[in-house]
Image (cartoon, rainbow, N blue to C red):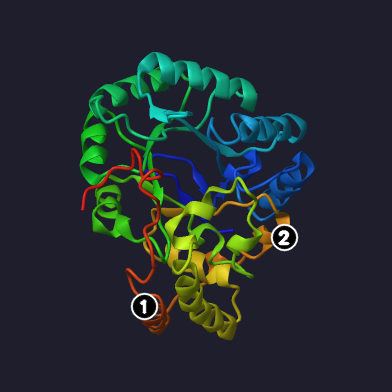
Amino acid sequence: MRRRPLGKGGPMVGAIGLGAMSFGGMFGPTRDDASMACLDAALAAGIDFWDTANIYGMGVSERVIGDYLAAHGPDVVLATKSGIVPGPPRSFNNAEDYIRAELDASLKRLRRDKVELYYVHRREAARPIEEVAETMARLIEEGLIDAYGLSEVAPATIRRAHAVHPVRAVQNEYSLWTRQPDLGVLRACTDLGIAFVAFSPLARGMLGDPPVDPAGMHDGDWRRTNPRFVAPNYAANLAAINGFRDWARGKGWTTAAAALAWVLDRGPNVIPIPGTRSAAHLADWLGADAIALTDADRAEIDALLPPGFAHGDRYSDEQMTAVERYC
């Protein structure tokens, strides 16, 4: 797999990373052996940048990755996160004592002395971001993390934090059906030498083969209440994406590979982290980093899935809590 730098001065990683949210059962029941097989497949494909969080299965995702690392010892770049306090009601905490306690717990589950990247999962609105950046700088000085990142934040927040201590990566949702980072976040990252890590680059399963179907979702799957997956929005989105699916098939690409190629094409600092717990699904991504889109390809994709094509917001009002809105 081709490689990209994880931000200015950061390590080189595979151009495509792995999101490990589903390892914690966030989209239905999961098994450790299936997750381990997925990690085997990721390494075999050159996917060595893995992304997890303390709340993915309330530590399950981190524990699975920690068990895998203890058994196999691969050299991978790990990112984890804290800042979301599970509810009900859900709240957000960026205080230093909370961040430190959560990092300590994450390191124990991961069986690591440090992680390469530690994110503020959601910003606590009442706390100055400069204070949070100072906390992260101290963790770096103490050798507990190599660098820090921010998630679902506005361009102004990125610039304020970076002025205190350089931000290594910013993680926001970004895909053919979610383009908000084009309205300032991508530019801020490019200007400052920050990696932009695109989560849900496959539209939460819609840009796969076959596309995800709400009727087959587990009862606890939060997508069942997501505006883009409920009627009549789901049918409209499926119809639009089926046109793209046919186009990708005509090019000899999987839908997932074509969608990831589009994300990778957005800039050399962009690293998508599609998520799966299935080695078979991961196989659909392979080769995306080798696809070189032409001007004609870009025009055809733009005609099939123009900015704003998606029916429904990317989150419900409840799900949008603590996502910074700036447009």
Callout 2: few (<14), some (14-19), or many (20+) C-alpha neighbours within 10 Å? few
Residue nearer the viewer, 36 or 326? 326
Q: Secondary structure at mark 2?
A: helix
**Up/down of 98 relative to 268, above or below:** above
**Up/down of 313 relative to 22, above or below:** below
Sooner in the amino-acid sequence: mark 2 or mark 1: 2
Answer with the quarter of the image where residue 296 lies.
bottom left
Residue 154: image tag: none
For the question of whether residue 98 can be seen, the reply is yes
The x, y position of residue 86, in whole percent, is 48, 29
Q: Secondary structure at mark 1?
A: helix
Q: Amino acid at mark 1?
A: Asp
Answer with the quarter of the image where residue 136 lies.
top left
The structure residue drawn at horizontal position 47% and vertical position 32%, both measured from the top left corner, is 81
Left or right side of 280 for 203: left
- Residue at the extreme front: 231
Residue matched to label 2: 280
Residue nearer the viewer, 87 or 63? 87
The structure residue drawn at horizontal position 45% and vertical position 75%, both measured from the top left corner, is 293
Q: Amino acid at mark 2?
A: Ala
Left or right side of 108 for 90: left
The structure residue drawn at horizontal position 35% and vertical position 40%, both measured from the top left corner, is 321
The x, y position of residue 161, in whole percent, is 26, 32
The x, y position of residue 115, in whole percent, is 52, 29
Callout 1: few (<14), some (14-19), or many (20+) C-alpha neighbours within 10 Å? some
**Up/down of 101 relative to 67, above or below:** above
Residue 302: image tag: 1
Label 2, label 1: how far apart the Cα atoms are: 29 Å
For the question of whether residue 14 can be seen, the reply is no
The x, y position of residue 47, in whole percent, is 61, 51
Answer with the quarter of the image where residue 25 lies.
top right
